Image: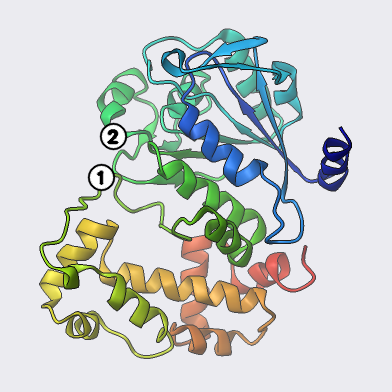
């Protein structure tokens, strides 16, 4: 009890994340939410979120009867959420409980951020909050989703969609991608990287990457991208090119492009730009206030190019990023 009280004291006033768990919910995505938002953060030195599970019933049977969840808060906890993660279940054709849909609508009406993992997009769409909005869901449900919710702009071939106050992720591990994206949005790249290291998970896979990424076992050990990726990450301030990366990997540019698409779901140039932008964010967070220096050290060239890419990828300017995530901001 003392530990619980201490934890509550440490998270008092923190951004409150509440997960609604309903009958037949998927345990994996629940675990992802708990790992990203619910755990203590000794690697950072402070807790990031006030986290709580809630359910409309005192006993909630999870997917396929794997186990029964008990001892969580009632559905009224959803009314206190700054971020509300909605239920996701594999039987997408089963209507959600009216009480759950009402809780989602109330949260949206008062300005809470809504998150749907995997089939959670069905919950959001059924609540009516996705009409005219962008969203994604697991690729295997894309056709069924479009048929039921034609007014939603479904992007079925991406990992996640950030549409401002409503965010959705595709199936399984994409929940971790979106969770880390939310942490990055709330606390910056440095903190998100620390969380990803604890998870032993890739720090940043862009939401626009493909859901279905082919990962064949390589015929030869040197077909892995890891060596050339590590080599490039140590030289981001250098004038790297796709041709240069291909030469380092001892393959043609076309072969390198195919391997990036198959193993990472993106292009070499897009990966390189993403890595440089992530480095630029870290430099700003560590206190570098001269944006021309940030641009040069991250390989982005000019302060103008830095501003263009940051606004396009994060939605804010370097100056706004500095105010939000620079030293002393949190």
Vertical side of 284 occupied by 57: above or below: above
**Nearest to the observer: residue 173 or residue 292:** 173
Q: Pointer 2: what residue?
A: 139
Quarter-of-image position of residue 136: top left
Q: Residue at x 50, y 44 (%)?
A: 163
Q: Secondary structure at mark 2?
A: helix
* In this rendering, position of residue 222 left or right of residue 275: left
Q: CA distance from mark 1 to mark 2?
A: 8 Å
Q: Secondary structure at mark 1?
A: loop
Q: Earlier in the sequence, mark 1 or mark 2?
A: 2
Q: Residue at x 30, y 70 (%)?
A: 226
Q: Position of residue 314 (x, y in %)?
A: 53, 61
Q: Position of residue 313 (x, y in %)?
A: 47, 62
Q: Looking at the figure, which quarter contains the C terminus?
A: bottom right
Q: Residue at x 53, y 19 (%)?
A: 127
* In this rendering, position of residue 160 left or right of residue 256: right
Q: Looking at the figure, which quarter contains the N terminus?
A: top right
Quarter-of-image position of residue 291: bottom right
* In this rendering, position of residue 154 left or right of residue 67: left
Residue 159 in view here: yes
Quarter-of-image position of residue 329: bottom right
Q: Pointer 1: what residue?
A: 212
């Amino acid at each position: 009890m003392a530990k619980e009280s201490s934890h509550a004291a440490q998270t008092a006033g923190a951004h409150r994340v509440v997960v609604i768990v309903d009958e037949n919910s998927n345990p994996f995505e629940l675990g992802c939410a708990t790992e990203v938002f619910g755990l203590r953060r000794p690697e950072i030195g402070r807790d990031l979120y006030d986290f709580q599970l809630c359910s409309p019933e005192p006993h909630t049977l999870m997917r396929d009867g794997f186990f029964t969840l008990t001892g969580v808060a009632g559905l009224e906890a959803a009314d206190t959420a700054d971020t509300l993660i909605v239920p996701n279940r594999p039987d997408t054709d089963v209507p959600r409980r009216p009480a759950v849909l009402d809780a989602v609508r109330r949260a949206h009406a008062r300005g809470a951020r809504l998150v749907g993992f995997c089939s959670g997009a069905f919950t959001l769409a059924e609540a009516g909050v996705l009409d005219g909005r962008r969203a994604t869901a697991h690729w295997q449900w894309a056709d069924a989703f479009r048929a039921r919710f034609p007014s939603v702009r479904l992007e079925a071939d991406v990992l996640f969609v950030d549409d401002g106050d409503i965010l959705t992720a595709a199936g399984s591990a994409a929940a971790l991608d979106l969770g880390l994206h939310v942490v990055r949005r709330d606390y910056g790249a440095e903190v998100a990287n620390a969380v990803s290291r604890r998870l032993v998970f890739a720090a940043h896979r862009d939401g626009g990457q493909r859901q279905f990424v082919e990962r064949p076992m390589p015929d030869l050990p040197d077909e892995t991208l890891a060596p050339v990726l590590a080599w490039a990450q140590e030289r981001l301030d250098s004038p790297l090119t796709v041709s240069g990366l291909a030469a380092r990997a001892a393959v043609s540019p076309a072969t390198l492009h195919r391997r990036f698409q198959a193993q990472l779901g993106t292009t070499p140039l897009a990966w390189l730009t993403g890595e440089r932008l992530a480095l630029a964010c870290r430099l700003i967070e560590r206190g570098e206030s001269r944006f021309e220096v940030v641009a040069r050290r991250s390989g982005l060239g000019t302060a103008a190019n830095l501003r263009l890419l940051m606004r396009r990828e994060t939605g804010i300017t370097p100056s706004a990023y500095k105010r939000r995530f620079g030293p002393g901001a949190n």
